[in-house]
Amino acid sequence: MDEALAMVRAHFGGRNSAHVSSGVMLSDSERVMVFSAACYPEESERRRPFGPLSMAAGERKWDFYPYEIAVGSYSPRFVEAEAAVAYHMVQGDIEDLLVRLCAPDASGRVPTGACTDKEDWIAPVEMCATYNANAGELARDLALSWVSLHEKQSVSRIARTSLEALHARVDAAPRGARVPMKGGSELTRSISRETVLKALATPPATLIEALEAAAVPDDAWRAAEPKAHEIMDLLRQLGEAPEGEGPPAFRADITTRGHTRFLEEHAPFHVRRLPSGGVVLATHPSRTLWPLWSDALFVLGLMS
């Protein structure tokens, strides 16, 4: 990082920032996403800290996930099923993207990362996906989130902080200190310093098992899946049929408030253990990872 930063700043110098863009094909959907990388001068960093090197995925969020799908012309609309289709269409891409960026080889040089459809790198538990090269340090997602929210620190500026240093910063906060959380129930709208410290003291294997247990789809999602698979089968037929042929269908907007609300409340979570020893937590971009974490912490009796 330091060598790359020095090279770019030495070449451009002064107040200039450097930008580069390229297209990358996603493995699951084969859609092409535009990536842009930027290096900012020191003066820009003082005005607003973006981080010395910054990469953005997609010029628009539509580059990342579709905003409409084909549904049967003569079938009644099933918003929940259409939302489930939207989830399936993007889930593989999210994990593929995160793993390819963070773990392209066995070097382990990227210890952590996250994915969101927001502009900035926010608290990991408020993102839609995170990556940790060492599953034994998964609790850093929780500690990094707490430190960022409590100290009003940009995550991009403290993401490289060691787990031990994050633990010390949480421990140094006043007893009973809490930070607000988004995307949870009425009972989980905040998290205490003591909960984070107890999570950091929990054996990593126990924490991951609790997260896996909490990732089970709920009843509303399971009820929507059969119709969602019918729609996905229709999409496959349309994709395989010659142009102008195939079953009758029309384009349905899947970004309405009804679709988004269903995803926010019911989109399932995936806890993926990687052969490298890392772990990925993921859901749809409309939802955050906090409900997964809060359920796991409740099961372990750590919420206070």
Image (tube, rainbow, N blue to C red):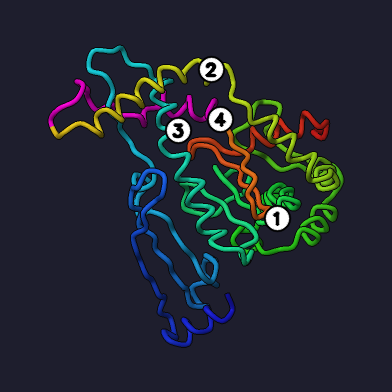
The residue singled out by tag 1 in the image is 134
Tell me how far mark 3 sits from mark 2, CA to CA.
14 Å
The quadrant holding residue 38 is bottom left
Q: Amino acid at mark 1?
A: Asn
Which residue is located at x 53 percent, y 17 percent?
A: 220
Residue 49 is left or right of residue 58, and the answer is right
Foreground disc of the pair 2, 1: 1
Tell me how far mark 2 sits from mark 4, CA to CA.
10 Å
The quadrant holding residue 113 is bottom right
Who comes first in sequence, dot 2 or dot 1? 1
Residues at marks 4 and 3 touching, judged by CB atoms closer than 8 Å: yes
* Element type where label 3 sits in the image: helix
The disc label shown at residue 87, or none:
3
Tell me how far mark 3 sits from mark 1, CA to CA.
27 Å
Q: Amino acid at mark 2?
A: Ala
The residue singled out by tag 4 in the image is 268
Which residue is located at x 40 percent, y 32 percent?
A: 86
* Element type where label 4 sits in the image: loop
